[in-house]
Image (cartoon, helix red, strand yellow):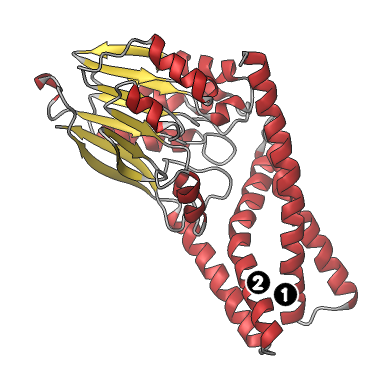
Amino acid sequence: MPQKIKKKFMLLAFISFFVFVSIFLLELNFIVFSAFSDVFNIIGREALLLGLVFLIFSGGFMVMLLIERYYSNIIIRFLYLFTSIWMGMFVYIFIASLIYILVNYFINVSYIVGILLFSVAIITSIYGILHGRKIMVKKIEILLPNLPKEWHGKTIVWMSDLHLGPINGAKFAEKITQISNSLSPDLVFIGGDLYDGSQKPDPYLIAGPLENLFSRQGVFFITGNHEEFGDPDIFISAVQKLGIKVLNNEMVEINGLQIIGVDYLNASQKKDFKNILADLKIDKDMPSILLKHEPKDLNIAKQAGISFQISGHTHNGQQWPFNYLTKLMYQGFNYGLKHHGSMLVYISSGAGGWGPPLRIGSSYEIVEIMLL
């Protein structure tokens, strides 16, 4: 598929996503409005005012999602943060509303039940916000066939889905850098969605602290889907300016270890992905690590002779109960260390998150990989 057609397809997908989600959120907000009105006995003008508030809230995040792509100031960042938090909280407020309406349909329950349900939803959301401020270090050990002795005991840091933008800024990038450097890695891989997709603030400045990432054998980057939401060249140029090596459907060999990085847009189609790996002429008798943002088409990677694939993208659902959705979508390859035949696969939940800064049922993580 030609590059221009792929970019048009990405734009069309984004517009379709925007329209669908906006309509869907409007319907869900109506359910919350109905439950809220019933529990607190809101009628008349107050009900109209409440309905207007929910109408604004239902579209607020989607509107800010468009605005923050091109403009950045303290007001826009605050509104984006506010509407993002509301979106995260809304998940549990909606569940509480739905439970209340369904139970009330069969049994005429007291308004106290509704208040209790809404309270649980709020408390859960607060926990998610607090938990979302923590970044854990996930340690795994990988045994690769035919791994040269000089790589035994060496460490790799994988970080994906930082989503630098209106919420995660330069301070977040500095925190990530400090954690990574404390692990004294031999290699550092940045696995896509480094940016949230917005071109404001300046991509180079917001990722500036990553210039100080320590690695004995280099820092490597691949693109994710969010780098395709704007002009990917702007993000790639910013990464290169930081002194980070961009692997755009390329392979580098370091001391007998093959490191392959594929671009998200080109590798998103099965046929293109297969051709990319075939053109790289991967030596199946040597150990190889594939950096691929999205954990799909694993069979193609396995057939190409990949020893170990590292991915992100799924966020492990980010918020319960969406982890069940990602597990279904990726057939169990939504999080953690997995076997796909002879190939090992690790899917990270991401060092950052998209949209709501809440984590429930998953955690932000940087992955420390020890080679055995």
x and y, in percent, of residue 13 in the image: 68, 33
Q: Residue at x 42, y 34 (%)?
A: 160
Q: Is residue 146 above or below residue 29?
A: above
Q: Residue at x 47, y 36 (%)?
A: 162
Question: In the depicted view, which residue is nearer to us: 236 or 333?
Answer: 333
**Snapshot quadrant of residue 252:** top left
Residue 298: mark in rendering: none
Q: Is residue 261 above or below residue 166?
A: above
For disc 1, the marked residue is 35
Question: In the depicted view, which residue is nearer to us: 345 or 115?
Answer: 345
62 to the left or right of 136: right
Amino acid type shown at disc 2: Leu
286 to the left or right of 213: left
Secondary structure category for the residue under label 2: helix
**Snapshot quadrant of residue 8:** top right
How many angstroms separate mark 1 from mark 2 (CA)?
8 Å
Amino acid type shown at disc 1: Ala
Q: Is residue 73 above or below residue 236?
A: below
Q: Residue at x 46, y 43 (%)?
A: 330
Q: Residue at x 42, y 29 (%)?
A: 191
- Within 10 angstroms of label 1, few (less than 14), some, or many (20 or more) residues? many
- Within 10 angstroms of label 2, few (less than 14), some, or many (20 or more) residues? some
Q: Is residue 226 above or below residue 243?
A: below
Residue 98: mark in rendering: 2
Marks 1,2: beta carbons within 8 A: yes
Secondary structure category for the residue under label 1: helix
x and y, in percent, of residue 303 in the image: 34, 24
Say which of marks 1 and 2 sits in front.
2
